[in-house]
Amino acid sequence: MNLEAYRAAFDEVRAEFEQTVATFGLPFEREESQPRALRADAVCAHCENNTASLWNTWISPACLACRTGEETATFFVSLKCTRRCYFCFNVNQEDYEFYRTHERDIASELQRAHAAGVTFRHLAITGGEPCLHPERVLEFVHCAKRLYPDAHVRMYTSGDLLDDELLDALAHAGLDEIRFSVKPEESCEQREETLARIGAAVGRIPDVMVEMPVIPGTLDDMKELLQRLDSLGVRGINLLEFCFPLANSEAFAARGFKLRRNPYDIPYNYWYAGGLPIAGSENACLELLQFADQAKLHMGVHYCSLDNKFSGQIYQQNKPFLLDRSFAARHAWLSFDEDDYFLKCAKVFGKDVEVVKRIIANSFADAQEDGCDSSFLDTEIPLLAFPLAWIPFIVQQAPRVDIGVSINVLEPGEGEPYRIRELALERWRG
């Protein structure tokens, strides 16, 4: 087996995934309209988190923490809501129907976590609509500030039920940030009411934000909205990649939407319930970043792609590789990528195995000492795995060797604490 034959298995997985998605009733665009490589050319001051997070002027500290998921948690009282958005992805939440009619005691949940020794630096309240449960929300904020005085606490809301009295109570409790969801298809009257609530929050809550998906075809409306928000003194806006929640396909099809080709950079079973990206949304988000820069808006503008939602999961799954030195030593051909948090190694196949094996034996023999396994040989395929750091030397010694970069995650193992799952193999291009 050679490298291309090995890679074909991953191509088949991607093709099967797209065939399965097609059964949900929304087609893919023919060609990817916005390849991820173009993000690096976007007009913005910051292109971060492996190009998944792009922003100007200001970004919420909670957004930075979200990239790794370290000491962060999100709570909801219920999934009951005041709106019925056709693109809502809460239908994908575990026990969605149950929590539409039942409540959680989120302050008690936080107290139990604290008693168990869990530390938090960022806490969030979402829904549903949190303001349907003002007493529980206020109790949570007070509890959070008592148990974790330095924690950053934020709340998500449509603003429908957020009156001045509740705003003052949230401010008094110590809420650090509030994020309003402005609905693209709300009426002019609803939009003005939402903007009035946003304006009322400015000056009461330290950081007032808007977080909303950018729907293809709404670019002019979004530009006008950005200017209105900036004039209100809003601290920032998170522009979300618009997604299809694998439900309500008729509403998406009626609006002419198609799925983004190559929806996942690395296909995997991601926890985030948001669904799959819609073609054209990222293009619009990047254009809005450019508009904000040219218009010299004071507020922060952050494009949060769907890819950006996944990095915390990958970091948390692969974090044991950084902490368990014994496990890492037994798998020393792997390395933790600080850019995208995947575990990676180099691989060669077929006739190249013996060539690289000889180079390793002659030049890297000391790397196998002290219980450190720096290469892995599978004689059945055959394949040889070795550290990425060795590639330049090996290519220098054997320029014709065909090398792939293997991309992996840790999952719960059987017999061992973790098992290594390979997700993709990309050709190394130097």
Image: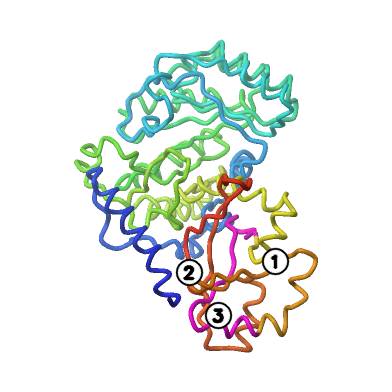
Residue 426 badge: 2
Query: Is residue 279 or residue 399 the one in the foreground?
Result: 399
* Separation (CA) of disc 1 from disc 3: 17 Å
Count of all numbered marks drawn on residues in the image:
3
Residue 54 lies left or right of residue 112; in this view the side is: left
Q: Quadrant of the C terminus?
A: bottom right
Residue 58, visible in the rendered structure: no
Comes first in the chain, label 1 or label 3 = 3
Residue of label 3: 353
* Separation (CA) of disc 3 from disc 2: 17 Å
First to last magenta residue range: 336-358
* Separation (CA) of disc 2 from disc 1: 23 Å
Q: Residue at x 66, y 41 (%)?
A: 70
Label 3: few (<14), some or many (≥20) within 10 Å?
many
Residue 246: x and y, percent? 31, 40
Badge 3 element: helix
Quarter of the figure with residue 185: top left
Residue 282, visible in the rendered structure: yes
Query: Is residue 300 or residue 61 the one in the foreground?
Result: 61
Quarter of the figure with residue 264: bottom left
Q: Residue at x 61, y 48 (%)?
A: 418
Residue type at mark 2?
A: Glu
Residue of label 1: 373
Residue 364: x and y, percent? 72, 78
